[in-house]
Image: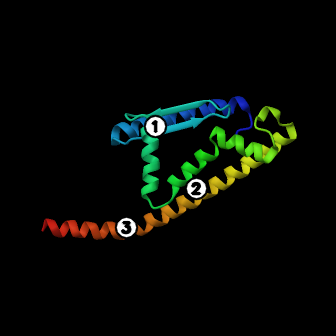
Amino acid sequence: RIENKSNRQITFSKRRKGLMKKARELSILCDAKLALLIFSSTGKLYELCNGDSLAEVVQRYWDNLGASGTDTKGLRFEIADIWSDEAFSQLVQSHFGVSELEHLSVTDLMELEKLVHSALSRIRSAKRIAWNRRAEKKKKSPSDVTRNLRVAHNRCD
């Protein structure tokens, strides 16, 4: 981490521009569909998406994960349900006895923040496990690819 805030911001800006340039080049040269999202330390969003809309690229991402055999689609919908306004209000109501965040004390808000961080930790852990499973499946797949190539080669002969 760059300690000097000004130097950190300059480095972020330069590297962000370079990363976006490389992503554009990859997209053009290889006809790849991509979406790049970058959030600065201040929370500002920088995005790049080629051709398809960002929503379409993200949907393809989720569809691809679902096709890999992991239950990420179910996880995604479960997370969306948990964080919907109604469900979140119910969580706050059941845990703190109030339905609006404005009615919580600073101590209660800090406790809620800890709960949210804990939930995010569990979500990230589940995501890591899903990615590891996917990577393991991909490691096993070269033999399948080799077998398919042999079959295709035999058909050509």
Mark positioned earlier in the residue sequence (3 or 1): 1
Q: Secondary structure at mark 1?
A: helix
Amino acid type of the residue tagged 2 in the rendering: Lys
Q: Secondary structure at mark 2?
A: helix
At a point 71% along the width and 40% down the height, the residue shown is 89
Label 3 sits on residue: 142
Q: Quadrant of the C terminus?
A: bottom left
Question: Is residue 17 in sight in this rendering?
Answer: no
At a point 54% along the width and 62% down the height, the residue shown is 132
Label 2 sits on residue: 127
At a point 22% along the width and 69% down the height, the residue shown is 151
**Marks 3, 1: nearer the viewer:** 1
Q: Position of residue 42 (x, y in %)?
A: 68, 31
Q: Position of residue 48 (x, y in %)?
A: 47, 33
Mark positioned earlier in the residue sequence (1 or 2): 1
Asked if the residue at tag 3 contacts the one at tag 2, i.e. Cβ–Cβ closer than 8 Å, the answer is no
Q: Secondary structure at mark 3?
A: helix
Mark positioned earlier in the residue sequence (2 or 3): 2
Label 1 sits on residue: 55
Q: Which of these two is toward me, 4 or 53? A: 53
Q: CA distance from mark 1 to mark 2?
A: 20 Å
Question: Hey, which quadrant is residue 43 in on the image?
Answer: top right
Question: Hey, which quadrant is residue 156 in on the image?
Answer: bottom left
The vertical placement of 130 against 55, above or below, is below
Is residue 82 toward the left or the right of residue 156 in the image? right
Amino acid type of the residue tagged 1 in the rendering: Ala
Q: Position of residue 118 (x, y in %)?
A: 73, 52
Amino acid type of the residue tagged 3 in the rendering: Pro
Q: CA distance from mark 2 to mark 3?
A: 24 Å
Is residue 86 toward the left or the right of residue 68 in the image? right
